[in-house]
Image: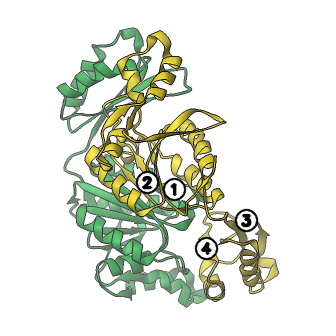
Chain colours: A yellow, B green
Amino acid sequence: MTQRVVRTAAALVIGNELLSGKIRDANVSELARALRALGIRLQRVVMLPDDIAILAEEVRALSANFDVVFTSGGVGPTHDDVTVEAVARAFQVEVVFDPKLSELLHEVYGERISDAHLLMARVPQGATLCGSPDVEWPTPVMKNVWILPGIPDLFRLKLLTARAWLKGPMPFVSRALFLRVEEPLLKPLLDAVVARHPSVEIGSYPKWFDPTYRTQITFDAETSTSAQAALEDLRSLVAESDVVRVE
Amino acid sequence: MTQRVVRTAAALVIGNELLSGKIRDANVSELARALRALGIRLQRVVMLPDDIAILAEEVRALSANFDVVFTSGGVGPTHDDVTVEAVARAFQVEVVFDPKLSELLHEVYGERISDAHLLMARVPQGATLCGSPDVEWPTPVMKNVWILPGIPDLFRLKLLTARAWLKGPMPFVSRALFLRVEEPLLKPLLDAVVARHPSVEIGSYPKWFDPTYRTQITFDAETSTSAQAALEDLRSLVAESDVVRVE
């Protein structure tokens, strides 16, 4: 299996239960970390209700604008599971039953299997099934859209398959400096460092209500040399006694 | 203070740290629950990086399509805090210093105040400040866009102010039925109930890896009578021994 190189990603997180606050999403940060580790940039996340027309329009837009798209949720057998239909509509194809998924469902449910179970074998016509050695159940992928389940344990499992198939141009290097200095006082120093290191993505995160440090400064770059250089540059501008730790 | 009646809401969650998985968002579910309690429908959430042009375009689109919009994050004093500028650009106005916020910052920081601190007094020209008796710090609101901080404790606090100013047409009633029946087996029964109760929003959520029940069915409606009717309808279709609990 050759990994496909992709640069940008988007996610479409689906479910009325998220927008009504009944459930708190757990998948975006998992996806973000997995993509980060591969060197793929997650650039847009959209959370939408279980509405086929709205979802189809979003799938079409995200698929056109990003190298790879991940959907989360809406793949069960009930009336509120509309993701497969929405992805099919986005690409103007039919929903069909995949024989391989059908066979797997028969293996799992045996004689108990019903038409409702078999709804989980639906895929958009033309979708391919991507598998990996460590994950038993294959993932339907329609063009550049990976269709993942919303249940966090299963979503995380499917990310293992995505990691086997995709990679970024190069992994990111992340460094961090934890300082006892308040963010507003750091600002002029930080502005100078940001200007001197344009290739490094520098983030500043104040910590409230924490006695150990005041501000975390992060340095993300494509090489450890450039991340390190920016970190050392800022470090040289603050008192050593204000440095709580370096990561 | 008269509460403004709004029906639909959207959220724009801002920050590279969320899209890189360094931080897991905690604000969407808080906002969702607060709006739900007011009877306002959260219909779209978008998560984007700290990029003024991209954010400005999104603010413009969300503001035009939803009754109220909440932004989360990007309101500190550093280079990666670009929300105020993005909102200003969305409405083609300048960024100005608000005298009231400036005064409050002077009160808090006293003689230690610096230009960087005062950056937190910036607002889009024409923004109003909304306060409430229980929250000391006012929230800038530009047309229908509420500009909230990303730090979860502060975000939650500001929601108290939003709750004082906004309300939905009527609050939702939520009921739930926890069943021992697997989702695929419930499906035909559920389809019948969904068809008979078009005004009730019915959700089905399988619970994996939990021994106490298999599927949670939720019933959301504008009246308790209609939610109750749909719940009782489904309940009459399953064996009483399969009902784990009713909420």
Q: Residues within 10 Å of mark 3 (few under 14, many from 20)?
A: few
Q: What residue is disc 4 on?
A: A204
- Label 4 and label 1: CA atoms lie apart by 16 Å
Give above or below for A191 relative to B149: below
**Contact, CB < 8 Å: mark 2 with mark 4?**
no
Q: What residue is disc 3 on?
A: A212
Q: What residue is disc 2 on?
A: B28
Amino acid at the residue labelled 4: Ser
Taking the spot 50% from the left edge, 76% from the top edge, the residue there is B81
Q: Is residue A89 visible?
A: yes
Q: Residues within 10 Å of mark 4 (few under 14, many from 20)?
A: many
Q: Secondary structure at mark 3?
A: loop
- Label 2 and label 3: CA atoms lie apart by 27 Å
Taking the spot 54% from the left edge, 35% from the top edge, the residue there is A138
- Label 1 and label 2: CA atoms lie apart by 7 Å
Q: Which mark is residue B82?
A: none
Q: Which mark is residue B25?
A: 1
Give above or below for B26 relative to B173: below
